[in-house]
Amino acid sequence: MLFVISAPSGAGKTTIIHEIFKQMPELRFSVSATTRKLRNGEVNGEDYYFISHDEFEKKIDNNEFIEWENVHGELYGTLKKEIESSINNSVNTILDVDVKGALSIKKLYPDAVTIFIDAPKKEIEQRLKGRKTESEEQLNKRIQRMEWELGEKDKFDNVVLNKTNPGGIKIAAEKIIKIIKNKS
């Protein structure tokens, strides 16, 4: 089963996914490709395949993605080989993708379970600013896109709230784990 998790930047998606894997290490993570720079603590080949724009564009030309998107000037995509491997091996797999990518995957794989991680706008903005990984211009682009992404959440099979409060990440992760166990 494919579990497609999506959220606006800063909603806590990556942190929640890490928490899910602590409790369910048998799940597989579908590693996406991106042209953006590696962030502190990320590992190439585990968090993303960090590749050049040229290499990404070659993969587009070779039809190697099931979906790809230009997000804030950087390219992100889900490689066909990642999904085919999961399906062929009957492995429950988590995909961490942007909102457009999640909706595209759902069209290609109607049985995939889509999960939107929601958070209050002000909290998302504070988290983005607190990361200090983007320029002011990039930050503003992410905030503008957040408005559109939050408006798409009703198109997802499940919506899980992640509030900044004690235990918020663990609560959100537990809700997603219940979804995974119910659908597996």
Image (spheres, rainbow, N blue to C red):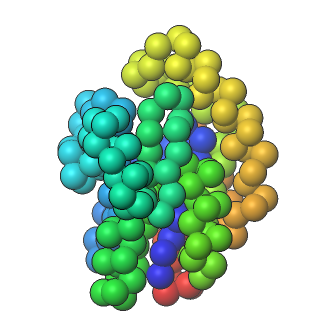
Residue at horizontal 46 percent and vertical 56 percent from the top = 96
30 vs 24: above or below: above
Residue 157 sits in quarter: bottom right
47 vs 140: above or below: below
Residue 135 can be seen in this image: yes
Residue 131 sits in quarter: top left
Residue at horizontal 53 percent and vertical 11 percent from the top = 136
Residue 167 can be seen in this image: no
Q: Position of residue 64 (x, y in %)?
A: 37, 61
Q: Position of residue 169 (x, y in %)?
A: 49, 50
Residue 132 sits in quarter: top left
In terms of depth relative to the viewer, which is nearer, 80 or 93? 80
In terms of depth relative to the viewer, which is nearer, 101 or 163? 101
Number of numbered labels in the structure image: 0
Q: Is residue 123 left or right of residue 29?
A: right
Q: In the orientation shown, which residue stands out farthest toward the top?
A: 136
Residue at horizontal 49 percent and vertical 87 percent from the top = 184
Q: Position of residue 150 (x, y in %)?
A: 73, 44
In terms of depth relative to the viewer, which is nearer, 165 or 154? 154
Q: Is residue 152 left or right of residue 130?
A: right
Q: In the orientation shown, which residue stands out farthest toward the front?
A: 61
Residue at horizontal 34 percent and vertical 52 percent from the top = 59
In terms of depth relative to the viewer, which is nearer, 67 or 99? 67
Q: Is residue 155 left or right of residue 48?
A: right
